[in-house]
Amino acid sequence: MSELEIPYKIINITCEPIDELHLPSFKGSSFRGVIGRTLRQALCVLKSYKDCHQCPIYKNCYYAYIFETIPDPHKKLPFNLHKYPSIPHPFVIEPPLDNKNIFKSGETFLLKIVLIGKAVSYEPYFIIAVELAGEHGIGKENRKFILKDTLSTDILRLSVNFPLTNDVLHHQKSSKVLINIHTPLRLIHNKKLVRKLEFHHLVRSLLRRLTVLYYYHVSEKLPEIPAKVLIELAEKVKVVDNDLKWYDWERFSYRQDKRMKLGGLIGNITFEGPIEPFFPLLKAGEILHCGKNTSFGLGKYEIVEV
């Protein structure tokens, strides 16, 4: 049996608008943008470098580690990690999930931030960044809010076990799982966005995400993971009910100075087949999210019933 153990912490931040606050239906990108800008403002000591990767203290900068993490081009990497030009950020921002656009003065809302791996020790910086974001303002009109309360978990641990033998993996009973995807799920397979979701797409993405998060943000000593065998088994799981739809939306990136299309799948889907070996992986994905753009809350799903 092989195991990945990933420490994480959840910060629950209660915020209250000073003036009426106008936000888009999906609020994650707005919070991701303003928190990134205020964190850079608070932590960056050499602001004359617009590109963090050119900064002489890049490797020792908290902001760069959190928001600008890229692999070292001179470092030999295990498996196929060299294929990925960027590293998943060690955090996930979970905004309110409802479609509410207007928050009146005095009306509170909850912002959750999941810190992953070594980033669990950076909790104070995230709280400061949210507080500064409130002072700076959010949304088109930079409406301000105040931080009313914070409540954090202890350091928790995700344990994902993988059976290593073909015999264990290929003698599995059939079972069902229904997954509710709350925020757009953006998966890439064969260099294309997945619009018709299959179970192995989900497994491939989760294996990749957890492996890369573990290597860069927990430990470079990766345990043996039978990825090929797991994917072969995942391909035997079938879709028995599909109520997913494509949700189109876009955000403006201040850093890239352009609008970005970030559509993805939302809704319910039911899978049936040899699913049991994948439950630890699926449960980890509930917390760490799945797919692209997870740092501002995309790829959030819930296992509804088993």
Image (cartoon, rainbow, N blue to C red):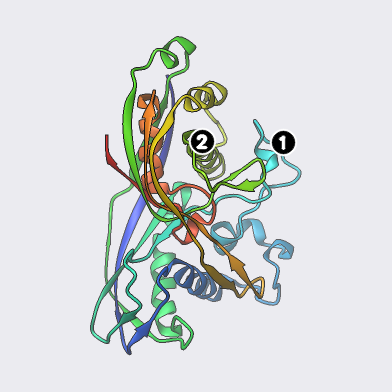
The answer to whether residue 82 is seen in the rendering is yes
From what the image shows, is residue 253 above or below residue 139?
Answer: above
The residue that label 1 is drawn on is 76
In front: 241, or 15?
Answer: 241
The residue that label 2 is drawn on is 207
Taking the spot 42% from the left edge, 65% from the top edge, the residue there is 126
Q: Is residue 106 left or right of residue 193?
A: left
- Disc 1 crowd rating (10 Å Cα; few below 14, some 14-19, many 20+) is few
| Residue 253 at x, y percent in the picture | 60, 72
Which image quarter: residue 208? top right
Marks 1/2: CA distance? Answer: 20 Å
The answer to whether residue 224 is seen in the rendering is no
> Between tags 1 and 2, which lies in front?
2
Taking the spot 32% from the left edge, 40% from the top edge, the residue there is 178
Quarter of the picture containing the N terminus is top left
- Disc 2 crowd rating (10 Å Cα; few below 14, some 14-19, many 20+) is some
**Residue furthest toward the top?**
167
Taking the spot 44% from the left edge, 84% from the top edge, the residue there is 137
In what element is the residue under mark 2? helix
| Residue 24 at x, y percent in the picture | 42, 75
| Residue 249 at x, y percent in the picture | 51, 67
Mark 1 or mark 2: which comes first in sequence? Answer: 1
The amino acid type, in three-letter code, at marker 1 is Lys
Which image quarter: residue 274? top left
The amino acid type, in three-letter code, at marker 2 is Leu
From what the image shows, is residue 34 above or below residue 94?
Answer: below
In what element is the residue under mark 1? loop
Quarter of the picture containing the C terminus is top left
